[in-house]
Amino acid sequence: MKPHHIHDILITPEAIDQRVDELVLDMAKECRVEGIVMIGILRGSFMFLADLVRDLYRHDVHPKIDFLTLESYGAGTESSGTVKVTKDISVDVNGAEVLLVDDILDTGRTLTFAVDLLRQKGAKRILTCALLDKPERRVIPIEADFVGFTIPDHFVVGYGLDYDSRYRELPYIAKVTLLDE
């Protein structure tokens, strides 16, 4: 891991809480269907998905929950450009309505890959949700149905997002600044 600091907080815990509440109000209308399945793309989405599920419960939405582990970054700050499945879902989504939750939508490769995978598995309808959107990094044209925050092209950590498996526990989103060596 390169020398760095993470002092620049971009999104506070309070802003995250407020935005999750707003997203859930929009999602509840679309997700109040029998048998909806929420699939979190691991590892970065776990905190976001947990908060969404707890809030959806208050709106009488009771999804099945599963996780899909995809990898494209490894230990660096740049995507490799190749997405691979390291843990597939175990719930049957054939004929199901699915809400796919990701931590960040940047190049579009991961979300597109996951949507295509769920279509191949027979999902009837797939809605997508990304905590963060970095549209200036997009190389594949895809937009999430629900977006928490649109941010500039910074490498960020916190609230589930990591740098080389560190900082996921932070209750906020912060910019990673690499220091000159």
Image (cartoon, grey):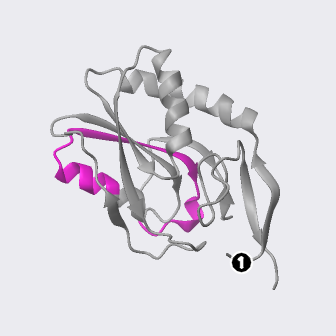
Magenta stretch: includes residue 121:
yes
Give the magenta-colored segment's residue range. Answer: 114-140
Residue 15: where, in percent of width, then height?
72, 35
Amino acid type shown at disc 1: Lys
Q: Is residue 119 left or right of residue 179?
A: left
**Above or below for 29 versus 141:** above
Q: Looking at the image, which residue is at 59% across and 48% down?
A: 160
**Above or below for 77 versus 22:** below
| Res. 75 in view | yes
Q: Quadrant of the N terminus?
A: bottom right
Q: Looking at the image, which residue is at 26% across and 38% down?
A: 125
Q: Nearer the viewer, residue 142 or 5?
A: 5
Q: Secondary structure at mark 1?
A: loop
Q: Residues within 10 Å of mark 1 (few under 14, many from 20)?
A: few
Q: Quadrant of residue 16?
A: top right
Q: Quadrant of the C terminus?
A: bottom right
Residue 131: where, in percent of width, then height?
56, 45
Q: Quadrant of residue 60?
A: top left
Q: Nearer the viewer, residue 36 or 71?
A: 71
Q: Looking at the image, which residue is at 52% across and 26% down?
A: 24
Q: Which residue is mark 1?
A: 2
**Above or below for 1 versus 122:** below
**Above or below for 4 versus 148:** below
Residue 138: where, in percent of width, then height?
50, 65
